[in-house]
Amino acid sequence: MLRAELDAIDLKILRELQSDGRMTNVELSERVGISAPPCLRRVRKLEEAGLIEGYHAMLNAPKLGYDLVAFCMIGLKHQSESNLKAFAAATDSWPMVRQAWMVSGDSDFLLHCVAENLTKFQDFVIEVLTANEHVHTVRTMLTIRQVKKAGLVEI
């Protein structure tokens, strides 16, 4: 399903679910202006097309004891396909890495990390990232405060 195939109701459904994925189908149907059965059919169609990848709860990291958010820019020794794939696969086994992107420019990967504290983050950087056989450089940026938190896509 391409964006061109989405009508105004589909876009409203996506916008509403991105804002609040826990609402009932009845509430969603009221918000988008259609009855519940066709609304549910549309949601299922959007899920089957892969436009809705899943539903999750957004947790408050500091209240759970995770006070540090950082970004790591990783440069690899060699940018061969096998090294890129190996490093990308390694990120799956690092719980501190919450999101990872392969990027262009001065770095090869950008990692979004969440840790309990600075010591645990430093240990991860030294013992895991810099110790990785493919890694040449690690540059870190500690965050001060999140100033915006929005859905991943503007609908």
Image (cartoon, rainbow, N blue to C red):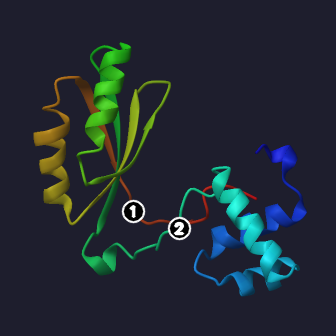
Query: Residue 144 — which label?
Result: 1
Which quadrant of the rendered structure holds the N terminus? top right
Read off the residue under disc 2. 55
Q: Residue at x 23, y 26 (%)?
A: 135
Amino acid under disc 2: Tyr
Using the rendered view, name the quadrant where residue 17 is placed: bottom right
Using the rendered view, name the quadrant where residue 27 is placed: bottom right
Q: What is the C-alpha distance between the residues marked 1 and 2? A: 28 Å
Which quadrant of the rendered structure holds the C terminus? bottom right
Frontmost residue, 27 versus 143: 27
Vertical comparison of 109 with 4: above or below:
above
Circle 2 residues within 10 Å: few <14, some 14–19, many ≥20 = few
Amino acid under disc 1: Ile
Q: Residue 81 vs residue 93: left or right?
A: right
Q: Residue 85 vs residue 118: left or right?
A: right
Q: Residue at x 48, y 69 (%)?
A: 56
Q: Residue 11 vs residue 88: left or right?
A: right
